[in-house]
Image (cartoon, rainbow, N blue to C red):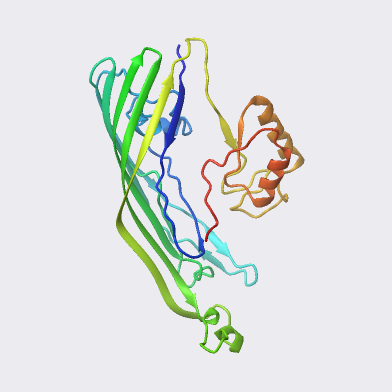
Amino acid sequence: MSRSLGLATALLLAVAVPGAVIAQGFSVNEHGSCVMGRGGTGVALPCDDGSTVLFNPSGFAGTTGWTLSGGVTLIKAMGSFTDDLTQQQTELQNELVPVPHAYLTYGINQQWAAGFGFFVPYGLGTEWPATFDGRFQGYDNSLHTMYFQPTVAWQPHPSIKLGAGFDFVVGSLKLTQRADLSEFDTGAGLTFGQIGIPHHTDFANGKLEASGATGFGGNFGVTWDATAWLSLGARYMTLTWSNGTRWADSSGDTALWGGLTDFGREVVLEMNRLGMMVDVSHVSDDTFRDVMQVSKAPVIASHSSVRVIR
């Protein structure tokens, strides 16, 4: 049985916004039942459903005939916010969001193959009631991106495959927030808050919306079949998700441990010993600092967002 080493890089679309903006990003990884069944791994040993167009464009070089696949994943975000002072709870109001994908590949000959992929790797949104306590930061926000990727793969040697795709990206954005009158200037050198207007007094609705934005990028992949008995690859593990674990606090949950527990530190050291990369995405600030102090190897942040763009 042969094993493969896959290296794939993607040129991502970036958007700069003037001023200070609180940011939240979504990486959508549900792009095929095979990759989902493998827990998101589809680079070193590509699936044969065409999803390799996204995960490693070199993976379908050397194939024969046509492959066509597609599907839709329905995602519904659920959650709530509880005010620390009033203990009032507000529920997230997101609807089901369809995330489509489609792949088409064709093996031209033993060396060359061509394909096309349509997928949505970034997007989703959050929708809260207009009375949500966080409405002054944002209450109805969404980001949608659609990638269209023609791809070519080439196998110059039985053990080497190369692939490249050109990404044409179409995106849309909606940011909605309430304006707080107490923070506005009166024109006399004072804010309305300084003359008695209560904090968080609704004043106006602000909305930034854009659609039809386009961008370009590339997706490149290399696959190397080392030998039939040698397996080369990479593996990593996140310490938390949106919920904390018994050994680490999450950024999306109530902190219980103040970072890593003693067992959590042992987990990090054992991952170092096994050669597993420690992924600090989703962890709390304290957990991140503990990991940086404990880990004897570099760590990664596989899908984290900036907090503020200035």
| Coordinates of residue 121 in the picture (x, y in percent) | 39, 43
Query: Does residue 32 show up?
Result: no
Q: Residue at x 36, y 52 (%)?
A: 144
Q: Quadrant of residue 82?
A: bottom right
Query: Does residue 159 show up?
Result: yes
Q: Quadrant of residue 114?
A: top left
| Coordinates of residue 274 in the picture (x, y in percent) | 65, 25
Relative to 103, is 130 above or below?
A: below
Q: Residue at x 51, y 87 (%)?
A: 187
| Coordinates of residue 308 in the picture (x, y in percent) | 54, 59
Q: Residue at x 73, y 41 (%)?
A: 293
Instruction: Indicate left or right for 121 with 65 as reference.
Output: right
Instruction: Indicate left or right for 170 with 196 as reference.
Output: left
Q: Residue at x 58, y 53 (%)?
A: 252
| Coordinates of residue 94 in the picture (x, y in percent) | 42, 58
Q: Quadrant of the N terminus?
A: top left
Q: How many marks?
A: 0
Which residue in the rendered view is the most extreme toward the right? 262
> Looking at the image, which is closer to me, 231 or 257?
231
